[in-house]
Amino acid sequence: VDREYFHSEEFQTLFYLLLERLHTTHDREKLKMFGNALGNSGSIDFKPDDKEQYIRVLRDLSLGDLKVLNDNDLKGFLPSLPHVNIDYGPEVLPSLCRLQGMGLVITRLRPIKIQPGNSSNVSDAEAEPRMAFFLSGFGETFLRFISAQDSD
């Protein structure tokens, strides 16, 4: 931890940005994320990062958006597996689109491979390409930034 950072103008800016939202945020989980973000802003691990961008994103996301972002369906290789079709429900898609717009999630269109000669047995829904959502590098760093860090 860079202790001098907590006396800097940059830290004060982040503090006041979160303080503005403190009055309109009642959820304990999100308030905890505010505290984690402020604490992590002084971490040497995040020194080169644009911490103000992380704070502004955190302020604008709902708790539901944050839960979608932290879901395992977006992480690792799972969205890339050809035999895994993740069904994104109507309650999740708006969050995924917001997360994509903020750069936290990326999308790829996955084509459906149909075996030659089997096209008559495939319904139109099965033949349509599927959208796959992945956690971006920015999203991974953001999740670390708002999470409690282990003390060594």
Image (cartoon, grey):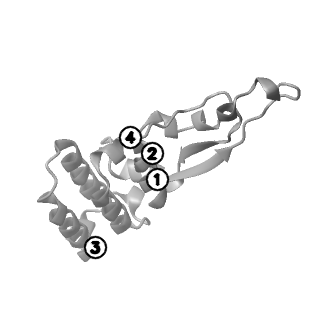
* Position of residue 139 in the picture relative to residue 85 (left or right): left
Q: Are marks 2 and 4 in contact (CB under 8 Å)?
A: yes
* Position of residue 3 in the picture relative to residue 80 (left or right): left
> Which residue type carries mark 4?
Glu
What separation in Å lies between label 3 and label 1 (alpha carbons)?
Answer: 30 Å
What separation in Å lies between label 3 and label 4 (alpha carbons)?
Answer: 37 Å
Instruction: Name which of mark 3 and mark 1 comes first in the sequence.
Output: 3
> Which residue type carries mark 2?
Leu
Q: Position of residue 123 (x, y in %)?
A: 70, 29
Q: Are marks 2 and 1 in contact (CB under 8 Å)?
A: yes
The residue carrying mark 4 is: 91
Q: Nearer the viewer, residue 10 or 27?
A: 27
> Which residue type carries mark 1?
Cys
Instruction: Name which of mark 3 and mark 2 comes first in the sequence.
Output: 3
Up/down of 147 relative to 99, above or below: above
**Does residue 23 show up?**
yes
The residue lying at 71 percent from left, 35 percent from top is 127
Instruction: Name which of mark 3 and mark 4 comes first in the sequence.
Output: 3
Q: Position of residue 116 (x, y in %)?
A: 88, 29
Residue found at the far bottom of this picture: 9
Q: Secondary structure at mark 3?
A: helix
What separation in Å lies between label 2 and label 1 (alpha carbons)?
Answer: 6 Å
The residue carrying mark 2 is: 93
Q: Nearer the viewer, mark 3 or mark 1?
A: 1
The residue carrying mark 3 is: 10
Q: Are marks 3 and 1 in contact (CB under 8 Å)?
A: no
